[in-house]
Image (spheres, grey):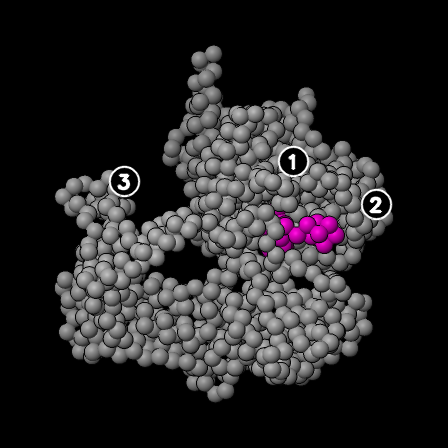
Amino acid sequence: MRPMDYIVPESAEAAVAILAERGENACPLAGGTDLVVDLKHAPGNINALVDVSGLAEFRGIDVTDEGLRIGSMVTYGEIMEHPVCLDKTPEVVAASHTVGAVQTRNLGTIGGNLVTCVPSADSAPALMVLDAEVTLIGPNGWRRMPIEDFFVGPRKTILEPYELLAEIWIPKHTLGKPSSFYKFGLRKGQALALVNAAAALELDGSRIVEPRIALGAVAPTPIRAVKAEALLDGQDVDAELLDEAAKIAVTESKPIDDFRASRNYRRQLIRTLTRRVLERSVEIARERQEQGELH
Amino acid sequence: MLVELTVNGESRSANVPPETTLLKMLREHLDLTGAKLGCDVGDCGTCTVIVDGVSVNSCLMLAGRADGCDVTTIEGLATADELHPLQQKFEEHGALQCGFCGPGMLISAKNLLDNNPDPSVFEVRDALAGNLCRCTGYTKIIEAVIEAGEMMGQEQANV
Amino acid sequence: MATRVKDVQTNVEDLVTARETRAPSRQPLAVPIDQPVTFPLELPESEARLRTPAVGQRATRPDGRLHGLGQTQYIDDITFPHMLHAKILRSEYAHARIVSIDTSEAEKMPGVIATLTGAEVPENSFGPTYQDQPILAYPIARHRGDGVAAVAATTEQFALDALEKIKVEYEPLPAVYDPLEALEEDSPKVHGDTNIYTSKVIKKGDVEAGLAASEHVFERRFSTQMVEHVPLEPHATIASWDGNGRVSIWSSLGRITLGREDLARTLQMPQSRIRLIGTVVGGNFGGKNEITNEPIVALLSKKSRRPVKAIYSRGDEFVSSTIRHPFIMDYTTGVDSEGRILARKIRLVLDGGAYCSWTGTTIGKGSILAPGPYNIDNVLVEAYAVYTNKTTTGAMRGFGAPQVCFAYESQMDDIADALGIDPLEIRLRNGFSENSLSPTGQSLQSVALKESLTQAADRFRWKEWQA
């Protein structure tokens, strides 16, 4: 690696200030599982790393009145072990489990994954179906937005210069919402998603309430399949209806042809995975209903 | 920059350029050449070491980040007169062929057994997904890890 | 341990006596046909196995303990005082004439002690069959993996930075990437005036007559892709040229005797002055079979008067080390109504990449094995290896055998499927048995093909799967 300054700031504000002061040649360092690889092979003009991975503002998993707060510098390994995540957001845990392998999950952070903003980011769909929000800190202070708005294009987020992703919030009303995540890669371990899909919904009797579908690796950014969601909203659960929603999800996607898979293959995956995550979410919702009746 | 670590229970330090990875520091500054450079991008797992209780790719971690941490490398498994159960079982099973994946593989396996002494085959596979063995000796490796877990369990019971 | 060696020795004697009466493989192992097979199947031990108790015994590797302790020394684990690190600049084009190389700016870079170009290599060619490959390409680069210059510096990073300062002026030449295109007359030529550099023909019987007499004829093209060995330890070398004019080279190369010959040739010095040390190798899988960067590192050591180490990056490994030959395989097979093969006509085109390397062995083995382990009276195999402007293909486990196996076994399935014959049955009908003649007329001994197939099928309950 080229000679590089390594700076550990004292606080989030300090990190922003240092980045602003050093300008475009400085880069924030999170887990490093993408950035360090890039710096070894295509370093560009980066000559300083501002290590934000240990900042208190970006760390920790807490439950507050608002919901669940996951610091952006929490690693996948930490999410997978955390009792609240295991209990309230099992599909975020499942999505985390599909990222890389043990060693990369112990370095890689959920915030780093979102900021890298590849279309196949595994954590994104699982968070999107839970109506997650993100908070950012930059030279102009803090701001907060739905996670969908954070993604702008392949490897492009809404972050302004010197702005940092601080937290991910999962609102209280979606904690424990029946949800499912499914990733399809060319291998079971260490593979990028050809397609990944997540769904979340509640059942009122047999009526679908607040359905959410999110897909990854099917468009320039992770997307919500809003038309498919609209079809399901308020309808009675029915196998054909779920498949119909899956078909609509295909029309909402713009998958690419590349060396990993053809566009057509990806379309078929989108339909199959969407149907599966919907079916699984319904199954979980029904199990909840049965448990509720028992109590 | 000065980086101070505890490596295999011993305090070590080195003055390294800030861009030095933990792997480079271990190999070139501390002469611990057990962990290997295989792919240099975090895919192959030959550089795996344990930092503060979790296994990481040391080729992707800057040495500066490990400052003050407790690091375990392959050199820290055996004592002068005793192999670690994993080393004994890997040897008995012929689980290492060319041996290049071994240091990383054993460290990943140790990290698994430290947290889960009685893993299922699935759990072993999952724990070793980040360690490639191009000789494809996986069957023997999995057998060795499971038996080492049993052996460690017995040792615990005997204490 | 001692007992085991003794046992084996006695049993070898037993075997020798037994061979006079009957080859072990001729005694079929009884598998009860009338009884349904359940897993795991308890097969009687074969006599051959009983006579060679070492077979099937667990043996520990003599080097296994050091591997587990992390104390095995691979080349990157070895260092010498004042050692330099070398990096190689690769061609910017798949095919180009190098007009000029200017290393002067690179030499001014911090930490740089020596540079090297192809013009400085005493004999700039090597190769196990044809010496058609340059150590560092000059004046023609024939693929993107060709090295064009090298730098030795005090750190790897200094060497990498210096590579960027080397100015190479290229005159791009038309390139050919597809092996079938390379066969055409007007295709760009990689070396000389034809791209075909090795061919092989095997003839047995009369293939056209056999095809004419066949009830059914099956034709299909099969192709396989490039495969890189990806040894976890990349190609690695350390060279140290001493004041007495002798060079010591530590290398991950497998064939050190051949390697020393190649080094003597390329460095133009007697073998007695070259010490080549084969170290523990972190995986080879049939590769690491010829010299690669050893002469470069040796010459950099000579120029810098310091030990020099060069470790391939994973990228170097993919573009510059040899890989498995992709094959394009046209199979025409005639069978009778029972699925017995009467004739098989095969045309193989091997994508050789830019240089010959171990193509001779690959085309030979590939051609001999191409008809498959089947009794066929009429065979014609024509095989051609062609140059393309791509990564050099060379030795990899099997030397062409896996490629043709994919083709002939796929076609056996096609035939079985079309004729409604069980895929196992069609193999048993055609398969080699004791004293079968290979396509080249060799009488085969100790053939246990059918026994192996039957036992394997029983073990994985083939019949139940078919039901």
Q: Which residues are magenta?
A: B25-49
- Please, which chain is the residue tagged with disc 3 on? C
Q: CA distance from mark 2 to mark 1?
A: 31 Å
Q: Quadrant of residue C246?
A: bottom right
Callout 1 amino acid: Gly
Q: CA distance from mark 3 to mark 1?
A: 43 Å
SS of the residue at dot 1? loop
Q: Which residue is mark 3?
A: C39
* Image-based side of A87 in relation to B8, left or right: left
Please tell me which residue lies in front, A262 or C464.
Answer: C464
The image's mark for residue B83 is none
Callout 2 amino acid: Ile
Residue C16 shows up from this direction: yes
SS of the residue at dot 2? helix
Q: Residues within 10 Å of mark 2 (few under 14, many from 20)?
A: some
Q: Which residue is mark 1?
A: B53
User: Viewer-nearest of labels 2 and 1?
Assistant: 1
- Please, which chain is the residue tagged with disc 2 on? A
Residue at 32% in and 56% down:
C10
